[in-house]
Amino acid sequence: MDKFQVLMKKFSPDMIEDKILTPLFIQLNTDDWKIKCQLIDLLSAVISNSLFLNDKLTTMLVHLVQDKIHAVREKASQLIINIICQQSPQWCDSMLIPKI
C-alpha cells in the first residue's frame, strides 16, 4: 500500500471532500485541458477507495465525459471504466447508470 492510500485511510470521507475533492472540483472549472487531465489523474488515486465515491464525484465524472476536449473525455471515460471494474454491479446501477 502506498503512502497516499495510508494517508487516505486516516481521514474521514467528510474531511476528504472538504480538503481535497472540493478544491479539485473548483479547479476542474478551468478551460485548460491539460490541467483537467492532470486533475483526473489525481482523482484516480482518491477514487481507489470506494468511501470517496459519492454522488457529487460521480456526477462530476460523468460531466467530464461530455467535455469539449477529446483528451479530457478520454481520461474521464477511462477513469469511469476503472471504477466500474472495481465496483459491484449494484453500485454501478445505483450510482452511475442514472447519471448516464
Image: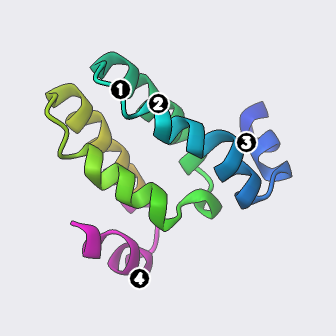
Residue that numbered label 3 is attached to: 5
- In depth, the one of 40 and 84 nearer the eye is 40
Q: Please state the horizontal and vertical placement of residue 44, each as a whole percent of the image.
A: 50, 40
Precedes in sequence: disc 1 or disc 4: 1
Q: Which residues are magenta?
A: 84-100
Residue that numbered label 4 is attached to: 90
Q: What residue type is disc 1 on?
A: Thr
Q: Are marks 4 and 2 in contact (CB under 8 Å)?
A: no
Q: Splitting the image into 4 quarters, where does residue 13 fall?
A: bottom right
Q: Residues within 10 Å of mark 2 (few under 14, many from 20)?
A: some
Whether residue 2 is visible, yes or no, is no
Q: Residues within 10 Å of mark 3 (few under 14, many from 20)?
A: few
Residue that numbered label 1 is attached to: 30
Q: Are marks 1 and 4 in contact (CB under 8 Å)?
A: no
**Is the residue 100 above or below the residue 8 in the image?**
below
Residue that numbered label 2 is attached to: 27
Q: Are marks 2 and 1 in contact (CB under 8 Å)?
A: yes
Precedes in sequence: disc 4 or disc 2: 2
Precedes in sequence: disc 3 or disc 1: 3
Task: Tell me which residue sits at (53%, 36%) in the image.
Answer: 24
Measure how far apart labels 3 and 1 are at the Cα level.
27 Å
Task: Tell me which residue sits at (21%, 37%) in the image.
Answer: 73
Q: Please state the horizontal and vertical placement of residue 86, each as a whole percent of the image.
A: 47, 60
Q: What residue type is disc 3 on?
A: Gln
